[in-house]
Image (spheres, rainbow, N blue to C red):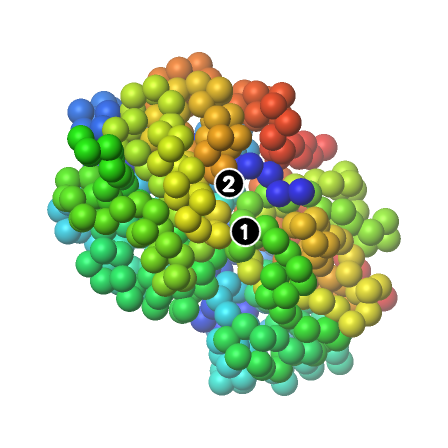
Amino acid sequence: MLKVRIIPTLLWKNFGLVKGVGFDSWRRVGPVLPAVKVYNTRDVDELILVDIVATREANEPDYASVQDFADECFVPFTVAGGVRDCRHIQQLLRAGADKICINTEAYQSPTLIAEASRRFGSQCIVASIDARRGQDGHYECLSHSGTRPTGKRPEDWARELERLGAGEILITSIDRDGTMAGYDLELIKRVVDAVQIPVIASGGAGTYQHLVEAVLQGGASAVAAASMFHFTEQTPLGAKTALAAHGIPVRARYLSHE
Amino acid sequence: MRVAVINYGMGNLGSVRRALAELGADVCIAETPPDLRSADRIILPGVGSFADGMANLVAQGWLDELRGECCERNKPLLGICLGMQLLASDGTEGGHSLGLDLIAGSVVRLDTLGCQHRIPHVGWNGVHGRQDSVLFKGLPEGTDFYFVHSFVFRTRNEAHVSATADYGVMIAAAVERDHIFGTQFHPEKSSKAGFKVLQNFLSYQPC
């Protein structure tokens, strides 16, 4: 049986890891490499690394650093930030990324998703959507790290990304990001119901119960969290115990005898 | 132990190379077919579509060398993910194309088998290895491995399936025929359990 993945998200800004609230007010968390090593040693299900300045500053992904991180990572490693063409994807894959996350560029040139999934396989293209609820109660997708409204509804855009060939959707609530107040379950459910590909819930996790809700009520295939792992005593392993107690299948750690 | 990892332009070789190096193997990335000759073990990795993968193997001249090393000189071969699928007789991804035909069978999309779950099949799934399988020696029943794929290998002979996983339908998680092996999951991304599978492949001695 397929297990629900618990995925720590690492937000990377210049030389270190940060975490903010609502895609802003960044707090320093620490250096990247030791965090990757620790999560690898703790045998997490997957890691997502987001370069939060690459798109804003129109930089190319930092391949050399990605390679240093990937060298320490023997679990699936998804890299996001600043990906604008197939050459970037190829270089990131060569540097050791397993999956590539695309957000802003998908709005500007949707053909990138189609071309990338054809060339590298759908399974390595994760389409990321950042959304917030407007005053009228409707959800809207934003690009450029949550700074530019796109006029698109998350469920419509998710459907379009699936049609173009994305293999997974990472849906992040900008309103809940960093608040630890719980995922936006309605947003997650809308996206989950709109597509047939796996959906990763992101934005707002603060307790194990939130993760449980994202799976049982939101229907997410995987749950991503940052603040709760950075700033509280809760761990991915503890999260598994909590999910399992609700009957959610989680991966048991294999302990080698060596 | 010299292990050649075939670079035929299909995806990330870095993690396979690093995992093997971690296990103490002397790893070389084979850039051209003659590079296989000095190797004791051959790994065919890969992500991407079946048709593209096969087209690259053909265009870069790998077929004869690969068949010679594996079939005549009996070198153990491990195909990973797309690399396992390419061991098949044929595949339908990216249009119908012939495979290496080292293990008889076809590669088809998951939903054609009646799978109702979300596709691709992404994440950790429990693998049930056959008692006598080489790759799963010493691994507990149901150990989780990392999968990411939309197509599956249906072998003609069920005896060639060395491990299964349940994704609404039973899928071949691994195949084995003599010294030819394949895993649908990524051992190089499956943490310690994956290392054990790779170690079993390296330790295997062909008769």
Labels 1 and 2 positioned on one and the same chain = no
- What residue is rendered at 19% in x and 58% in y? A108
Where is mark 2, residue-wise? Answer: A221
Q: Residue at x 34, y 68 (%)?
A: A115
Residue at the extreme front? A136
Q: Is residue B55 above or below residue B43?
A: below
Choose between B39 and A11: the one closer to the eye: A11
Figure quadrant of residue B67: bottom right
Q: Where does the image place residue A226, in percent across and percent down from the top left?
A: 37, 28
Dot 2 crowding, Cα within 10 Å, few <14, some 14–19, many 20+: many
B46 shown above or below A224: below
> Can residue A29 be spotted in the picture?
no
Instruction: Give coordinates of residue A145: x percent, y percent.
Output: 21, 41
Residue A210 left/right relative to A51: right
Instruction: Name the subunit of mark 2.
Output: A
Q: Secondary structure at mark 2?
A: loop
Please tell me whether residue A56 is drawn above or below residue A244 in the rendered image. below
Q: Residue at x 41, y 48 (%)?
A: A194
Specify the label residue B118 is tagged with.
Answer: 1
Chain under label 1?
B
Element at label 1:
loop
Q: Amino acid at mark 1?
A: Arg
Q: On screen, B98 above or below A126?
A: below
Q: Is residue B66 left or right of residue A120?
A: right
What's the distance in space between the residues labelled 1 and 2, CA to CA? Answer: 9 Å
User: What residue sits 27% from the left and 62% below the top?
Assistant: A110
Residue A35 percent location from the top left of the image: 39, 30
Nearest the eye: B29 or A83: A83
